[in-house]
Amino acid sequence: MWTVKDKWGNEITLTDERWHHISEGHWELADRLDQVLETIRLGRRRQAAGDPNKYRYSRAFDDLPHNYTHIFVIVRLAPGKFVITAYPKRVR
C-alpha cells in the first residue's frame, strides 16, 4: 500500500489490490508506479461530472509506450481517499 499527498493536501491511498488491478488491466503502466504516484502528487485535477467525490488526476509524460502522452488516475475523495484505477491515454 502507498500513500501520497496531492497538491490540495489530501492523503490518497493506492492499495495493493488496486495496483494489481491497474498493472494487470493496463500493462503499459506495470513498471510505472512512480509515475502513477507522481500524477497524484503533481498532476491536474478535475472533478467528475455527476459525482462530487470522484476526481480525475492527469499528468503528461514523454516516455510512455505506444504514443501515449498522459497518465490518468481516478480517485474517490469521500468516503475515504483512494485510487480507483489508472490508465494511459493519448491527448492531443
Image: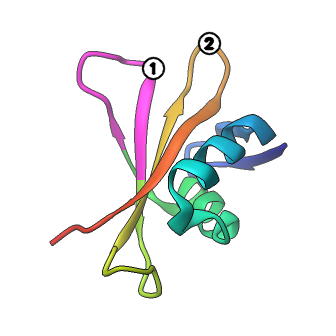
At 67% across and 19% down in the image, what residue appears? 80
- Label 1, on which residue? 53
Look at the image and give the residue range highlighted in magenta.
46-57
Taking 18 as reference, is 65 left or right?
Answer: left
Q: Quadrant of residue 92?
A: bottom left
* In the image: residue 52, left or right of residue 27: left
Q: Residue at x 34, y 17 (%)?
A: 51
Q: Which residue is mark 2?
A: 79
At 50% from the left and 48% from the top, the residue drawn is 86
Residue 9 is situated, as x and y percent measured from the top left of the image, at 64, 42
Residue 52 drawn above or below residue 62:
above
Looking at the image, residue 48 lies above or below residue 44: above
Quarter that holds the N terminus:
top right
Earlier residue among tags 2 and 1: 1
Residues at discs 2 and 1 in contact (Cβ within 8 Å): yes
Q: Residues within 10 Å of mark 1 (few under 14, many from 20)?
A: some
Q: Is residue 51 magenta?
A: yes
Task: Assign a secondary structure to mark 1.
Answer: loop
Between residues 9 and 47, which one lies in front from this camera angle?
Answer: 47
Give the CA separation, mark 2 to mark 1. Answer: 8 Å
> In this view, which residue lies farthest toward the left?
92
Q: From the viewer's perspective, tell me whether residue 21 is left or right of residue 13.
A: left
Relative image position of residue 35 (x, y in whole percent): 60, 69
* Secondary structure type for disc 2: loop
Say above or below: 66 vs 4. Answer: below
Residue drawn at x 22%, y 67% is 91
